[in-house]
Image (cartoon, grey):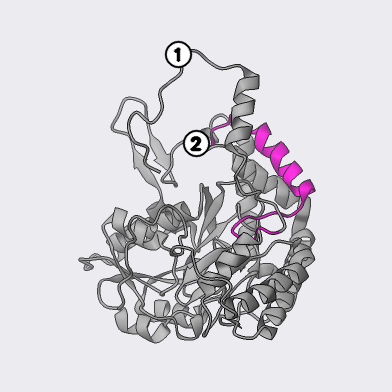
Amino acid sequence: MTVRAGAASFFAHGHSLEEVRSELTKARATDTTWKHRRNLRASYFAGDDVVAIATEAFTACLGQNALYGAVAYPSLRQFEAEVIEILLALFRAPAKATGSITTGGTESIFMAVKTARDWARSERPAVTTPTLVVGRTAHAAFDKAAHLLGLEVRRMATSPNFRADVDGMAAAIDRNTIMIVGSAPPYAYGVVDPLPEIAELATRHGLWMHVDACVGGMVLPFIRDLGHPLPTFDFTLPGVTSVSIDLHKYGYAFHGCSALLLRSEAMSAYQRYEFDAWPVGRYSTTNFAGSRNGGPVASAWAVMRYLGHAGYQALVAKMLEAKAGLIAGIRRIDALEVIGHPDGTLLSFGSPSLSIEAVAGEMNRRAWTFARQTDPPGILLLLNGFHGEIVADFLDDLEATVGAVKAGRVQATAGPAVYTGSNRKRRSATGA
């Protein structure tokens, strides 16, 4: 957010605690309640007990800077190491694999792109214009990272069957391609990309392959372990080089906590930035950020210890049950259709004949919160473990809303879908 000059002035004197608390309450009066059962947006809640243990761990390490974990806060190094070991096991990584904690999915993706770029400088010196090949639904952070790092992106124009266009990606690869990307799953549609086919392209052309599992990384391993069919998404695919996983999503840590996993510790040399030409000594990080609050990684560690594999799996099972109920109910409502065959714990739906914008606006008026998508126009639902409790209410309101739209009693009033930020300017995708 950009704030104009003079929008507020600093106070000559401090306010009392009571005044600040009152102002804080007033300012937050219209905020969405993040753990409300009618919130089906990107808000991740596993129960008040989970929030309590995450809060205790977070506040215990609140003033600790993870940048100085090696010299001042050995507990943070322990927490990070144990969290990474759990993630490597979930993603069936080889013995020499490694990983690191970042402040969020965007930073994990940024560091993956940076690591691939520096790897290519060493291993593929003939490359003149390093290029990434990504699917239509790949996260915008890949374009953001490429923009900041001086790389180019070839983003596919379509998603056949709502998955990455493997044939188009194959055709887009040339001598300058260094990286290829698949999502497990992307936000759009919730359908895991054909990762085995993308991994085969990576192996054939000697490319760095990144799997963006930011939204699915703490879900898909448990869906697999529950016996549900899934495309292979982990390091058992020989072509997979790196994986990003957000722990502040379905890992139930507090924001911001994500992870970047690498197939080999040797590759971390390309991730690391080092500098010593100043008076304070060696500066060395595997992150873009310098100082990092120790609270998020402590909360991730505590929740993992508290829930264990069985706890996460039980939550995922509840979400799958809710998803099945929603999909069945949506398909029973005339004029609506589920988009693709969602693999994880999110799904989207639209309509070939009705204004889905009108449907979304009326559902918002009925106090339902969710995300929207544009291609095709749709409503995107991200589930939590308690959403089984609201399936019937959601479907009742949805059926009534569709009836009102059909009858002309409800018109579209909402603006275009926005992932984050404002509508002032959007960078368009270019097909390959």
Q: Which residues are magenta?
A: 38-67
Asked if residue 62 lies in the magenta stretch, the reply is yes
Report how far apart the C-alphas of labels 1 and 2 lie in the structure: 34 Å
Residue 143 is left or right of residue 127, and the answer is: right
Report the amino acid beneath label 2: Leu
Residue 21 visible to the viewer: yes
Is 245 rendered above or below residue 23? below
Mark 1 highlights which residue? 12
Residue 309 in the image: x percent, y percent?
75, 61
Say which of 76 and 106 sits in front.
106
Decide which of tag 1 and tag 2 comes sooner along the chain.
Answer: 1
Locate residue 388: give its quadrant: bottom right
Is 269 rendered above or below residue 383? above
Is 385 rendered above or below residue 401? above
What residue lies at 59% left-to-right and 80% top-to-bottom?
A: 406
Residue 267 in the image: x percent, y percent?
43, 58
Q: Quadrant of the N terminus?
A: top left
Residue 231 visible to the viewer: no
Q: Which mark is residue 379?
A: none
Report the amino acid beneath label 1: Ala
Say which of 358 and 235 sits in front.
358
What residue lies at 52% left-to-right and 85% top-to-bottom?
A: 353
Q: Which mark is residue 67?
A: 2
